[in-house]
Image (cartoon, helix red, strand yellow):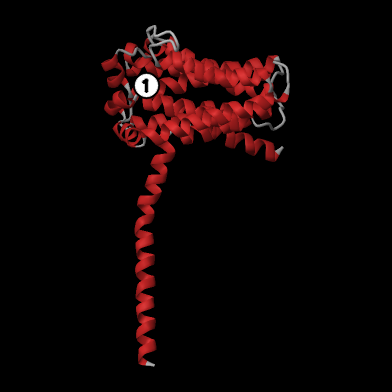
C-alpha cells in the first residue's frame, strides 16, 4: 500500500511538472507563431483572400480558386520583398528584418513554392487568369530590383521613383483582386467591376503610404521617395484623408447610379470610416508599427461588415 501511494505521488508530480512546462511554453510558442504569421507576410495572404471574397460578393461572382491564388501570390511577393529589403528594414522595422534574415532560406523556398502553386492553379482559369497571376510578380521585379532579367542591364528601380512606386503597387493589386475572380468565372468586365477596381486602387494606394510613415528614415537613407519623405508626416495625413474622401465619393457615385446596391455599399462606408480613424492618427501616435498593421486590417473590417449584411439580408 505504501509503495503504491509513493508511486502515485511520483506520477502526480511528474504530470504536474509536465503541465507546468507546457503552460510555461505557451506564451513563447504563441509569440513565435504570431511572429511567423506577421513577419513572413502570411497574414497579408489571409487579408488578400478576404478581399477577393469581398470582390466576388460585390460583383456577384460565383466562388472560384481565385482567393487561394491571390493568397499564394501575395505571400510570395511580399516575402520576396521583405527578403530584398531586409538590410534597409533593419532601421525602421528591426524585428521583422531579424526574423527575415534568420529564416531567409526557408522564406525563399516557401515563396517560390507559393508562386508556383498559384501559377499552376491559375491555368484552370485560362490564359487571362494566368496573365493576371503573373502580373504582380513581373511588376515586383521592376519595382524592387534594378536589373532586367536576361540582359544584365541595370535601370533605376520603380521603388525609387516618387509616386510611381505606390501607383505600381496599387495598380498591381487592384487589377489582381478585381479581375482574377472575373477571369476564373468567365465574366465580362462591367461598369461595376471598373468601380470596384477604382475602389481598391485608392484603398491600396492609401494603405501603402501609411507604412511609409514608419519607414521614413530607412527610405531617406536609400533614396526612396515616398509621400511622407517628400511632404512630411502632417501633410501626408491630409493627403491620405483626401484620398479617403475621394474613395467615399466613388462609392456614393456607384450607389447613386445603381452600379452598387446600398446594402453592399454600406460595408465599404464602414471600412472608409475605419480608414479615416486610422489616417487621423498619422503623426499623432508614437506606435507607427501598430498604425501600419491597423491600416492593413481595413479589409477585414469591410469583410466582417459585408458578412453581417449578407447574413441579415
Quadrant containing the N terminus is: bottom left
Residue 87 in picture, x, y percent from top left: 29, 25
Image point 37% across, 83% down: which residue?
7
Q: Horizontally, is 195 left or right of 213 in the view?
A: right
Q: Residues within 10 Å of mark 1 (few under 14, many from 20)?
A: many
Front residue (pair 227, 110): 110
Q: Horizontally, is 246 left or right of 91 in the view?
A: right
Residue 125 visible (yes or no)? yes
Q: Horizontally, is 252 left or right of 287 in the view?
A: right
Quadrant containing the C terminus is: top right
Front residue (pair 80, 90): 80
Provide the secondary structure element on which disc 1 rests: helix
Front residue (pair 225, 98): 98
Image point 37% across, 27% down: which residue?
83
Residue 197 in picture, x, y percent from top left: 60, 17
Image point 50% across, 21% down: which residue?
204
Q: Is 27 rendered above or below residue 142?
A: below
Residue 82 in picture, x, y percent from top left: 38, 27
Residue identified by numbered label 1 = 212
Amino acid at each position: 500500500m505504501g509503495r503504491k501511494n509513493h508511486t502515485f505521488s511520483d506520477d502526480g508530480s511528474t504530470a504536474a511538472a509536465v503541465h507546468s512546462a507546457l503552460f510555461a511554453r505557451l506564451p513563447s510558442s504563441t509569440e513565435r507563431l504570431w511572429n511567423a504569421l506577421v513577419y513572413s507576410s502570411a497574414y497579408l495572404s489571409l487579408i488578400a483572400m478576404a478581399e477577393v471574397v469581398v470582390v466576388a460578393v460585390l460583383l456577384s461572382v460565383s466562388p472560384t480558386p481565385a482567393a487561394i491564388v491571390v493568397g499564394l501570390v501575395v505571400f510570395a511577393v511580399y516575402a520576396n520583398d521583405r527578403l530584398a529589403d531586409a538590410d534597409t528594414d533593419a532601421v525602421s522595422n528591426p524585428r521583422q528584418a531579424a526574423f527575415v534574415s534568420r529564416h531567409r532560406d526557408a522564406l525563399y523556398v516557401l515563396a517560390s513554392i507559393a508562386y508556383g502553386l498559384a501559377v499552376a492553379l491559375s491555368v484552370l482559369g485560362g490564359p487571362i487568369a494566368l496573365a493576371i497571376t503573373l502580373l504582380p510578380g513581373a511588376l515586383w521585379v521592376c519595382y524592387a530590383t534594378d536589373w532586367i532579367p536576361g540582359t544584365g542591364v541595370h535601370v533605376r528601380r520603380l521603388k525609387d521613383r516618387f509616386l510611381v512606386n505606390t501607383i505600381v503597387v496599387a495598380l498591381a493589386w487592384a487589377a489582381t483582386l478585381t479581375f482574377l475572380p472575373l477571369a476564373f468565372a468567365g465574366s465580362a468586365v462591367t461598369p461595376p467591376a471598373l468601380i470596384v477596381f477604382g475602389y481598391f486602387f485608392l484603398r491600396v494606394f492609401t494603405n501603402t503610404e501609411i507604412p511609409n510613415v514608419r519607414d521614413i528614415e530607412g527610405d531617406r537613407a536609400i533614396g526612396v521617395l515616398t509621400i511622407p519623405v517628400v511632404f512630411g508626416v502632417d501633410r501626408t495625413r491630409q493627403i491620405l484623408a483626401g484620398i479617403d474622401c475621394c474613395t467615399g465619393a466613388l462609392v456614393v457615385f456607384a450607389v447613386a447610379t445603381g452600379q452598387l446596391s446600398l446594402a453592399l455599399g454600406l460595408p465599404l462606408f464602414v471600412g472608409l470610416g475605419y480608414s479615416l480613424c486610422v489616417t487621423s492618427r498619422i503623426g499623432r501616435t508614437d506606435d507607427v508599427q501598430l498604425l501600419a498593421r491597423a491600416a492593413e486590417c481595413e479589409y477585414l473590417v469591410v469583410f466582417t461588415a459585408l458578412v453581417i449584411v449578407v447574413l441579415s439580408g
